[in-house]
Protein backbone atom coordinates (compact mmCIF):
# COMPACT_ATOMS: atom_id res chain seq x y z
CA UNK A 1 0.00 0.00 0.00
CA UNK A 2 1.26 3.49 -0.80
CA UNK A 3 0.22 6.91 0.48
CA UNK A 4 -2.35 7.42 -2.29
CA UNK A 5 -4.05 4.10 -1.64
CA UNK A 6 -4.07 4.89 2.05
CA UNK A 7 -5.63 8.29 1.41
CA UNK A 8 -8.34 6.70 -0.72
CA UNK A 9 -9.30 4.39 2.14
CA UNK A 10 -9.87 7.32 4.49
CA UNK A 11 -11.60 9.36 1.80
CA UNK A 12 -14.05 6.49 1.40
CA UNK A 13 -15.09 6.13 5.06
CA UNK A 14 -18.75 5.20 5.11
CA UNK A 15 -20.52 7.78 7.19
CA UNK A 16 -24.05 7.15 8.32
CA UNK A 17 -26.09 9.98 6.87
CA UNK A 18 -29.81 10.56 7.11
CA UNK A 19 -31.79 13.71 6.86
CA UNK A 20 -28.70 15.95 6.94
CA UNK A 21 -27.70 14.64 10.37
CA UNK A 22 -24.05 14.93 11.27
CA UNK A 23 -22.18 11.79 12.33
CA UNK A 24 -18.54 12.79 12.91
CA UNK A 25 -17.78 9.69 15.02
CA UNK A 26 -15.39 7.90 12.67
CA UNK A 27 -13.33 10.97 11.65
CA UNK A 28 -12.98 11.91 15.33
CA UNK A 29 -11.77 8.43 16.29
CA UNK A 30 -9.20 8.40 13.47
CA UNK A 31 -7.93 11.86 14.46
CA UNK A 32 -7.70 10.79 18.11
CA UNK A 33 -5.77 7.64 17.13
CA UNK A 34 -3.40 9.66 14.93
CA UNK A 35 -2.80 12.02 17.86
CA UNK A 36 -1.94 9.12 20.20
CA UNK A 37 0.34 7.62 17.59
CA UNK A 38 2.19 10.87 16.93
CA UNK A 39 2.43 11.99 20.55
CA UNK A 40 3.09 8.74 22.41
CA UNK A 41 3.83 6.23 19.67
CA UNK A 42 0.78 4.39 20.99
CA UNK A 43 -0.42 1.84 18.43
CA UNK A 44 -3.25 0.12 20.25
CA UNK A 45 -5.90 2.01 22.14
CA UNK A 46 -7.75 0.18 24.93
CA UNK A 47 -11.44 1.05 24.72
CA UNK A 48 -11.56 1.94 28.42
CA UNK A 49 -8.81 4.51 27.83
CA UNK A 50 -10.37 6.30 24.89
CA UNK A 51 -14.02 6.15 25.95
CA UNK A 52 -13.78 9.34 28.01
CA UNK A 53 -11.77 11.39 25.48
CA UNK A 54 -14.05 10.23 22.64
CA UNK A 55 -17.17 11.27 24.56
CA UNK A 56 -15.61 14.66 25.13
CA UNK A 57 -14.76 15.03 21.42
CA UNK A 58 -18.30 14.09 20.41
CA UNK A 59 -19.68 16.59 22.89
CA UNK A 60 -17.33 19.37 21.79
CA UNK A 61 -17.29 18.83 18.03
CA UNK A 62 -20.33 16.69 17.27
CA UNK A 63 -23.99 17.62 17.00
CA UNK A 64 -26.02 18.05 20.20
CA UNK A 65 -27.38 14.67 21.32
CA UNK A 66 -28.95 13.20 24.46
CA UNK A 67 -26.31 10.47 24.72
CA UNK A 68 -22.93 9.84 23.10
CA UNK A 69 -21.70 6.49 21.84
CA UNK A 70 -17.93 6.14 21.46
CA UNK A 71 -18.40 2.37 21.05
CA UNK A 72 -20.05 2.85 17.64
CA UNK A 73 -17.02 4.13 15.69
CA UNK A 74 -14.71 1.91 17.77
CA UNK A 75 -16.59 -1.06 16.37
CA UNK A 76 -17.86 0.09 12.97
CA UNK A 77 -14.59 1.59 11.72
CA UNK A 78 -13.47 -2.03 11.22
CA UNK A 79 -15.75 -2.37 8.20
CA UNK A 80 -13.85 0.42 6.40
CA UNK A 81 -10.69 -1.70 6.48
CA UNK A 82 -8.69 0.88 8.45
CA UNK A 83 -9.18 -0.40 12.00
CA UNK A 84 -8.98 -3.68 13.88
CA UNK A 85 -9.93 -4.85 17.33
CA UNK A 86 -7.83 -7.19 19.43
CA UNK A 87 -8.14 -8.72 22.89
CA UNK A 88 -5.47 -9.70 25.40
CA UNK A 89 -4.15 -13.10 24.34
CA UNK A 90 -6.63 -13.19 21.46
CA UNK A 91 -9.59 -14.38 23.57
CA UNK A 92 -12.87 -14.64 21.75
CA UNK A 93 -15.45 -12.12 22.80
CA UNK A 94 -18.66 -13.51 24.27
CA UNK A 95 -20.86 -11.34 22.15
CA UNK A 96 -22.48 -11.15 18.82
CA UNK A 97 -19.63 -9.77 16.78
CA UNK A 98 -22.01 -7.74 14.71
CA UNK A 99 -22.84 -5.34 17.53
CA UNK A 100 -20.79 -2.80 19.45
CA UNK A 101 -21.00 -3.28 23.20
CA UNK A 102 -19.19 -0.83 25.48
CA UNK A 103 -19.51 -3.05 28.58
CA UNK A 104 -17.85 -6.02 26.87
CA UNK A 105 -15.15 -3.81 25.34
CA UNK A 106 -14.26 -2.55 28.82
CA UNK A 107 -14.48 -5.91 30.59
CA UNK A 108 -12.34 -7.80 28.07
CA UNK A 109 -9.82 -5.04 27.58
CA UNK A 110 -10.56 -4.74 23.87
CA UNK A 111 -8.07 -2.58 22.01
CA UNK A 112 -8.46 -0.83 18.68
CA UNK A 113 -5.82 0.32 16.24
CA UNK A 114 -4.77 0.71 12.62
CA UNK A 115 -3.96 -2.61 10.87
CA UNK A 116 -0.28 -3.34 10.24
CA UNK A 117 0.08 -2.07 6.62
CA UNK A 118 -1.63 1.23 7.48
CA UNK A 119 0.29 1.63 10.71
CA UNK A 120 3.58 1.17 8.86
CA UNK A 121 2.81 4.00 6.46
CA UNK A 122 1.82 6.36 9.28
CA UNK A 123 5.01 5.48 11.18
CA UNK A 124 7.35 5.88 8.24
CA UNK A 125 5.73 8.78 6.47
CA UNK A 126 4.71 11.79 8.62
CA UNK A 127 3.33 13.41 5.48
CA UNK A 128 0.71 10.62 5.31
CA UNK A 129 -0.51 11.62 8.77
CA UNK A 130 -0.87 15.22 7.65
CA UNK A 131 -2.65 14.34 4.41
CA UNK A 132 -5.19 12.05 6.11
CA UNK A 133 -5.82 14.49 8.97
CA UNK A 134 -6.37 17.38 6.55
CA UNK A 135 -8.65 15.24 4.45
CA UNK A 136 -10.84 14.33 7.43
CA UNK A 137 -10.92 17.89 8.78
CA UNK A 138 -11.84 19.36 5.40
CA UNK A 139 -14.50 16.75 4.66
CA UNK A 140 -16.30 16.81 8.01
CA UNK A 141 -15.71 20.11 9.83
CA UNK A 142 -15.77 23.82 8.95
CA UNK A 143 -12.46 25.69 9.11
CA UNK A 144 -13.41 27.37 12.41
CA UNK A 145 -13.09 23.90 14.06
CA UNK A 146 -9.73 22.79 12.68
CA UNK A 147 -7.23 24.32 15.11
CA UNK A 148 -9.28 23.52 18.21
CA UNK A 149 -9.83 19.96 17.06
CA UNK A 150 -6.16 19.35 16.34
CA UNK A 151 -5.25 20.66 19.78
CA UNK A 152 -7.91 18.49 21.43
CA UNK A 153 -6.57 15.28 19.87
CA UNK A 154 -2.97 16.40 20.37
CA UNK A 155 -2.03 16.32 16.69
CA UNK A 156 0.71 18.65 15.61
CA UNK A 157 0.33 19.52 11.94
CA UNK A 158 1.24 22.39 9.76
CA UNK A 159 -2.12 22.90 8.12
CA UNK A 160 -1.44 24.62 4.84
CA UNK A 161 -4.16 27.22 4.66
CA UNK A 162 -7.67 25.87 4.90
CA UNK A 163 -8.00 22.16 4.35
CA UNK A 164 -9.73 21.49 1.07
CA UNK A 165 -13.10 19.91 1.12
CA UNK A 166 -12.70 16.70 -0.78
CA UNK A 167 -16.28 16.18 -1.71
CA UNK A 168 -17.19 19.31 -3.62
CA UNK A 169 -15.59 22.23 -5.32
CA UNK A 170 -16.21 25.51 -3.53
CA UNK A 171 -17.77 28.37 -5.38
CA UNK A 172 -15.42 31.39 -5.17
CA UNK A 173 -18.36 33.74 -5.76
CA UNK A 174 -19.94 32.72 -2.44
CA UNK A 175 -17.79 34.96 -0.26
CA UNK A 176 -18.10 37.96 -2.55
CA UNK A 177 -21.88 37.71 -2.91
CA UNK A 178 -22.53 37.15 0.79
CA UNK A 179 -20.37 40.10 1.87
CA UNK A 180 -21.99 42.31 -0.76
CA UNK A 181 -25.51 41.29 0.33
CA UNK A 182 -24.75 42.35 3.91
CA UNK A 183 -22.92 45.53 2.98
CA UNK A 184 -19.56 44.11 4.19
CA UNK A 185 -20.80 44.22 7.80
CA UNK A 186 -21.22 41.53 10.44
CA UNK A 187 -24.91 40.58 10.48
CA UNK A 188 -24.81 40.36 14.29
CA UNK A 189 -22.71 43.27 15.58
CA UNK A 190 -22.51 45.44 12.46
CA UNK A 191 -18.69 45.52 12.51
CA UNK A 192 -17.11 46.70 9.28
CA UNK A 193 -13.35 47.12 8.88
CA UNK A 194 -11.31 47.93 5.83
CA UNK A 195 -7.58 48.03 5.36
CA UNK A 196 -6.56 49.77 2.18
CA UNK A 197 -10.03 49.19 0.70
CA UNK A 198 -9.93 45.51 1.55
CA UNK A 199 -12.54 44.10 3.94
CA UNK A 200 -10.88 42.29 6.84
CA UNK A 201 -12.18 40.07 9.66
CA UNK A 202 -15.61 39.75 8.00
CA UNK A 203 -16.28 36.26 6.68
CA UNK A 204 -18.93 34.46 4.66
CA UNK A 205 -20.29 31.75 6.97
CA UNK A 206 -22.32 28.81 5.77
CA UNK A 207 -25.49 28.29 7.80
CA UNK A 208 -25.84 24.65 6.74
CA UNK A 209 -22.24 23.53 6.52
CA UNK A 210 -20.59 22.88 3.23
CA UNK A 211 -19.55 19.52 4.76
CA UNK A 212 -23.21 18.62 5.32
CA UNK A 213 -24.20 19.46 1.75
CA UNK A 214 -25.14 23.12 2.36
CA UNK A 215 -25.06 25.02 -0.96
CA UNK A 216 -22.80 27.97 -1.82
CA UNK A 217 -25.78 30.24 -2.10
CA UNK A 218 -26.31 33.60 -0.40
CA UNK A 219 -29.55 32.31 1.18
CA UNK A 220 -27.36 29.75 2.98
CA UNK A 221 -24.85 32.40 4.02
CA UNK A 222 -24.29 35.06 6.64
CA UNK A 223 -21.67 37.77 6.74
CA UNK A 224 -20.14 37.47 10.20
CA UNK A 225 -17.09 38.94 11.89
CA UNK A 226 -14.43 36.40 12.89
CA UNK A 227 -15.74 36.24 16.45
CA UNK A 228 -19.41 35.77 15.59
CA UNK A 229 -18.51 33.27 12.86
CA UNK A 230 -16.73 31.10 15.38
CA UNK A 231 -19.51 31.44 17.97
CA UNK A 232 -22.13 30.55 15.33
CA UNK A 233 -20.19 27.48 14.14
CA UNK A 234 -19.71 26.12 17.66
CA UNK A 235 -23.40 26.58 18.42
CA UNK A 236 -23.10 29.36 21.03
CA UNK A 237 -25.99 31.11 19.31
CA UNK A 238 -28.50 30.44 16.56
CA UNK A 239 -31.27 32.23 14.68
CA UNK A 240 -34.95 31.48 14.26
CA UNK A 241 -36.69 31.86 10.87
CA UNK A 242 -37.47 35.51 11.72
CA UNK A 243 -33.69 35.99 12.17
CA UNK A 244 -34.02 36.61 15.89
CA UNK A 245 -30.83 35.67 17.70
CA UNK A 246 -30.88 33.26 20.64
CA UNK A 247 -27.85 32.62 22.84
CA UNK A 248 -27.23 29.11 24.16
CA UNK A 249 -27.98 28.44 27.83
CA UNK A 250 -24.62 26.62 27.86
CA UNK A 251 -22.61 29.75 26.99
CA UNK A 252 -21.26 31.83 29.88
CA UNK A 253 -18.56 34.43 30.40
CA UNK A 254 -17.57 37.80 31.76
CA UNK A 255 -18.56 41.33 30.79
CA UNK A 256 -17.07 40.76 27.31
CA UNK A 257 -19.47 37.86 26.84
CA UNK A 258 -22.33 40.13 27.92
CA UNK A 259 -21.26 42.87 25.54
CA UNK A 260 -20.31 40.80 22.48
CA UNK A 261 -22.95 38.11 22.69
CA UNK A 262 -25.62 38.28 25.38
CA UNK A 263 -26.61 41.85 24.54
CA UNK A 264 -27.77 40.60 21.11
CA UNK A 265 -30.02 37.91 22.61
CA UNK A 266 -33.56 38.43 21.30
CA UNK A 267 -32.44 40.97 18.65
CA UNK A 268 -33.14 40.60 14.96
CA UNK A 269 -29.89 40.50 13.04
CA UNK A 270 -29.13 42.72 10.04
CA UNK A 271 -30.67 41.40 6.85
CA UNK A 272 -29.79 41.79 3.19
CA UNK A 273 -31.71 44.54 1.39
CA UNK A 274 -33.01 41.97 -1.09
CA UNK A 275 -35.33 39.60 0.74
CA UNK A 276 -34.58 36.63 -1.56
CA UNK A 277 -30.99 36.74 -0.32
CA UNK A 278 -32.02 36.43 3.34
CA UNK A 279 -31.29 33.14 5.14
CA UNK A 280 -33.73 30.40 4.21
CA UNK A 281 -35.65 28.75 7.10
CA UNK A 282 -34.64 25.15 6.28
CA UNK A 283 -30.93 26.01 6.54
CA UNK A 284 -31.54 27.76 9.86
CA UNK A 285 -33.50 24.75 11.12
CA UNK A 286 -30.56 22.51 10.26
CA UNK A 287 -28.29 24.77 12.32
CA UNK A 288 -30.67 24.60 15.31
CA UNK A 289 -30.80 20.81 15.08
CA UNK A 290 -27.21 19.90 14.23
CA UNK A 291 -25.00 22.70 15.59
CA UNK A 292 -26.75 24.78 18.25
CA UNK A 293 -26.02 23.57 21.78
CA UNK A 294 -28.33 23.51 24.79
CA UNK A 295 -31.47 25.59 25.08
CA UNK A 296 -32.02 29.05 23.65
CA UNK A 297 -32.06 31.89 26.18
CA UNK A 298 -34.51 33.54 23.84
CA UNK A 299 -37.28 31.09 23.07
CA UNK A 300 -36.94 30.09 19.43
CA UNK A 301 -39.97 30.35 17.25
CA UNK A 302 -39.30 27.40 14.98
CA UNK A 303 -42.54 27.39 13.01
ZN1 LIG B 1 -19.79 40.42 14.74
Image: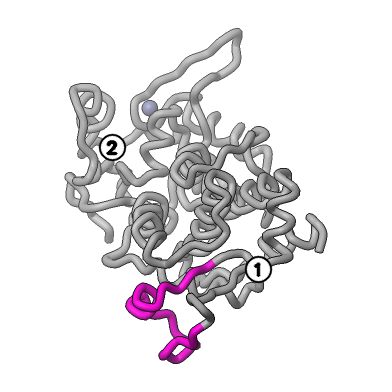
Question: Mark 2 — residue?
Answer: 268
Question: Mark 1 — residue?
Answer: 115
Query: Chief secondary structure of the magenta span?
Result: loop
> In the picture provided, is 249 more to the left or to the right than 61?
left
**Magenta stretch: includes residue 175:** no
Which quarter is ligand 1 in? top left
**Residue at the (44%, 44%) spot, across then down:** 152
Q: CA distance from mark 2 to mark 1?
A: 52 Å
Within-10-Å neighbours for mark 2: few <14, some 14–19, many 20+: some
Residue 160 appears at what percent x and percent y? 67, 34
Please tell me in which quadrant of the rendered image residue 59 appears: bottom left
**Residue at the (37%, 69%) spot, across then down:** 69
Quadrant showing the N terminus: bottom right
Q: Nearer the viewer, residue 254 or 238?
A: 254
User: Where 218 sits versus 47, above or below?
Assistant: above
User: Does residue 46 appear in this view?
Assistant: yes
**Residue at the (58%, 75%) spot, across then down:** 78
User: Where 256 sits versus 238, above or below?
Assistant: above
Quadrant showing the C terminus: bottom left
Q: Nearer the viewer, residue 186 or 303?
A: 186
Q: Nearer the viewer, residue 39 or 68?
A: 39
Residue 190 appears at what percent x and percent y? 37, 23
User: Does residue 277 appear in this view?
Assistant: no
* Element carrying mark 2: loop
Residue at the farthest top position:
196
Q: Which residues are magenta?
A: 91-112
**Magenta stretch: includes residue 99:** yes
Residue 130 appears at what percent x and percent y? 67, 45
Amino acid sequence: MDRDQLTEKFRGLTIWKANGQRAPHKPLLVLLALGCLQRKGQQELPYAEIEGPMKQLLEDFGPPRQTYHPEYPFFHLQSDGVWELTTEGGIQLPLDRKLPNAGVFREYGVKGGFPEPILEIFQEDPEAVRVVAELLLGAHFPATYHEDLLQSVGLDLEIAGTAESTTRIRDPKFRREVLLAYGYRCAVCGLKIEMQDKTVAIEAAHIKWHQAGGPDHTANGLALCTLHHKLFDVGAFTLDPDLVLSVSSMAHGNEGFQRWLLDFNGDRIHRPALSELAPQPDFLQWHVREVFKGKGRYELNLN
